Image (cartoon, helix red, strand yellow):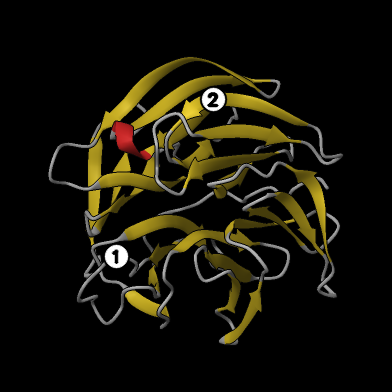
Amino acid sequence: MAYDVAVRAEAALGEGPTWDTGTGRLIWVDILGCRVHTYHPATGRRTVRTTEQHVGAAKPRTGGGLVLNLRDGIGLLDDDGTLRMLHRDAVPGRRGNDAAVAPDGSLWAGTMRYDEAPGGGTLSRITGDGTATTVLADVAVSNGTGWSPDGRLMYYVDSPTRRVDVFDHRDGRVTDRRPLAVIEDGAGLPDGLTVDADGCVWVALWDGAAVRRYTPDGKLDRVIELPVPRVTACAFGGPDLTDLYVTTARVGLAAPHPLAGSLLVVPGAGKGLPQPAFAG
């Protein structure tokens, strides 16, 4: 499948693409650049908002504005630029990383240590009133999180494990963790993911220059190769949710590809699911 350049950029660590159905825009972040980007493909309009600390993810809220997974916890960003903390959880040497909104509107937010030390990160569930519950402790690099179309399964990536794991999910709790897929040596590390309307899991491969699609039974059935080695995350967007948007990074590359750090798009890649907004 052929890719296009949606937004040419030099993000240090582009991450977390999210389609906002209500506004027809794609939201993504540059974690280390402390920037929240938006892109309206219908008009080409772009915005960039700077945050005061590293921002791992930005998701739409039901009442407008965004919820942010920041270095020191979860923040609420209003449309007028006002930022207030919903849940403060500052730990020296740790920051927020990828996050996703569950079918019930809760935010599942991951953290990781800057040195990526094993066990230094977590995955937590945050409700609209700011109540936080630790779902997984002893995580190294908390990354992609997503749910099956019926909400009964949750998929999750802790990158150094080289696995995409699957859990049973019910009432905001997960059980019976098991591997869906293992990324073989030399193919990169699993990073962000999204789930399509067929229940298949698309996962970005850091240092793998590709996005892979796995069926619900763990079979690899599609590979989209890209020119940028550090592919970080993917999400379906566009009016029909058929375009796959892909974020990339240039951090740590001695001679980055000219498109490293850009937002790419693969038109007509598949069929995505509408993503819920955070209920807060």
Q: Amino acid at mark 1?
A: Gly
| Residue at 29% over, 61% down | 230
Location of residue 201 by image quarter: top left
Residue at 16% in and 36% down? 184
Between 145 and 11, the one lying in front of the other is 11
x and y, in percent, of residue 143 in the image:
46, 43
* Closer to the camera in the image, 269 or 66: 66
Left or right: where 80 falls relative to 31: right
Q: Position of residue 242 (x, y in %)?
A: 46, 61
- Residue type pointed to by label 2: Ala
Q: Earlier in the sequence, mark 2 or mark 1?
A: 2
Q: Give left or right: position of 77 versus 244.
A: right
| Residue count near mark 2 (Cα–Cα under 10 Å), binned few <14, some 14–19, many ≥20 | some
Mark 1, residue position: 252
Q: Secondary structure at mark 1?
A: loop
* Quadrant of the snapshot with the N terminus: bottom left
Estimate how packed mark 1 is, as few (under 14), some (14 to 19) or many (20 or more) residues with alpha carbons within 10 Å.
Answer: few
Name the mark on residue 22.
Answer: none
Residue 117 place in picture, x, y as percent: 40, 37
Q: Residue 36, how many percent across, how many down?
A: 61, 70
Foreground residue, 272 or 263?
263
Q: Is residue 20 above or below residue 164?
A: below
Residue 218 seen from this side: no
Secondary structure under the numbered disc 2 in the rendered image:
strand
User: Label 2: which residue?
Assistant: 137
Residue with the most extreme front position: 92
